[in-house]
């Protein structure tokens, strides 16, 4: 059961409020109920939001936690004056002190995505997502020269979700290739990857966890058999060592942690931080 309800209120998508709020809440041993309230961009919607938050407070007997990234001061004022939750206004906490320190006013735009569809960064990110989808699971060898990173590893070691996360979050063109028994028999990387060895990063995983994941997909198959998983992982790791490829185990790591490690190791020159 959840111990507290957390609201994420924004006049935009709410992604900033939710990302920041979740990062803070992760420091506490609790499982809150999340309520997302995006596009609260009018006084009428603000009053509806206040009613919803206050109703939750009455039912649960506890103050809901409310993270906001509201730019419209009129809308924010309704929330501030009527809300019975614990209000955490992130713009008020961070933007206004920065305005004072920098001596300039912020844009006070509604959300970072309001005009993003016209930006080069947005276009690059869409292009990266399309690239990663086209080069998922070794589907295509074309255009690998334009890849920022090529992930290799046994099937179900986390290559696809990591590739898509890198594309969506950082605009990286990430291809991924499964290492298969034929590669292990040849004792070398797939030939198409050899010219791009500097871009290759390996993912591995504990055989026991790999067997669990594969059994969810193909129960009681040789593919998911623990002995087979042990052999594949051992062969893949041996191959990566021989090839001098950087690699890490995904067993206990989140996609975010994996992606961060890859960025630190690969360091694509075209990315700006």
Image (cartoon, rainbow, N blue to C red):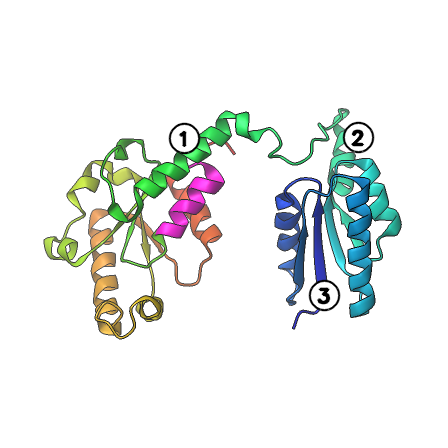
Earlier sequence position, callout 2 versus callout 1: 2
The relative height of residue 246 versus residue 101 in the rendered view (above or below) is below
Give the residue number, with chain letter if any, for mark 1. Answer: 269
Residue 94 image point, x, y percent: 74, 40
Residue 91 x %, y %: 74, 40
The numbered mark, 3 or 2, whose residue comes first in the sequence reads 3
Q: In which quarter of the image is residue 267?
A: top left
- The residue identified by callout 3 is 4
What is the magenta segment's predominant secondary structure?
A: helix
Query: How many numbered marks are there?
Result: 3
Q: Is 181 left, or right, of 117 in this rendering?
A: left
Residues tagged 3 and 2 counted as in contact (Cβ below 8 A): no
The answer to whether 242 appears left or right of 44 in the picture is: left
Please, is residue 24 above or below residue 192 in the view? below
- Residue 174 as seen in the image, left or right of residue 225: right
Q: Is mark 1 on a helix, strand or loop?
A: loop
At a point 40% along the width and 51% down the height, the residue shown is 161
Q: Earlier in the sequence, mark 3 or mark 1?
A: 3
């Amino acid at each position: 059961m959840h111990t507290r309800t957390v609201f994420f209120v924004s006049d935009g998508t709410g992604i900033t409020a939710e990302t920041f709020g979740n990062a803070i809440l992760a420091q506490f041993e609790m499982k809150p109920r999340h309520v997302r309230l995006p596009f609260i961009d009018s006084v009428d919607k603000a009053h509806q939001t206040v009613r919803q938050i206050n109703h939750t407070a009455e039912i649960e007997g506890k103050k809901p936690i409310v993270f906001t990234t509201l730019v419209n001061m009129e809308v924010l004022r309704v929330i501030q004056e009527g809300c019975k939750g614990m209000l955490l206004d992130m713009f008020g906490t961070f933007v206004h002190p920065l305005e004072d320190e920098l001596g300039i006013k912020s844009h006070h735009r509604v959300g970072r995505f309001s005009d993003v569809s016209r930006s080069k960064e947005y276009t690059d990110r869409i292009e990266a997502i399309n690239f990663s989808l086209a080069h998922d699971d070794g589907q295509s060898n074309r255009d690998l020269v334009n890849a920022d990173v090529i992930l290799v590893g046994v099937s179900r070691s986390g290559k696809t979700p990591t590739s898509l996360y890198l594309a969506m979050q950082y605009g990286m063109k990430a291809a991924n290739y499964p290492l298969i028994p034929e590669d292990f028999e040849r004792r070398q990387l797939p030939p198409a990857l050899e010219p791009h060895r500097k871009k290759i990063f390996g993912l591995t995983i504990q055989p026991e966890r790999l067997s669990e994941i594969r059994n969810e997909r193909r129960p009681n198959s040789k593919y998911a058999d623990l002995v087979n998983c042990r052999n594949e992982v051992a062969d893949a790791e041996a191959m990566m060592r021989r090839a001098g490829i950087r690699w890490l185990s995904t067993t206990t790591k989140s996609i975010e942690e994996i992606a961060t490690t890859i960025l630190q190791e690969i360091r694509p020159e075209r990315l700006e931080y």
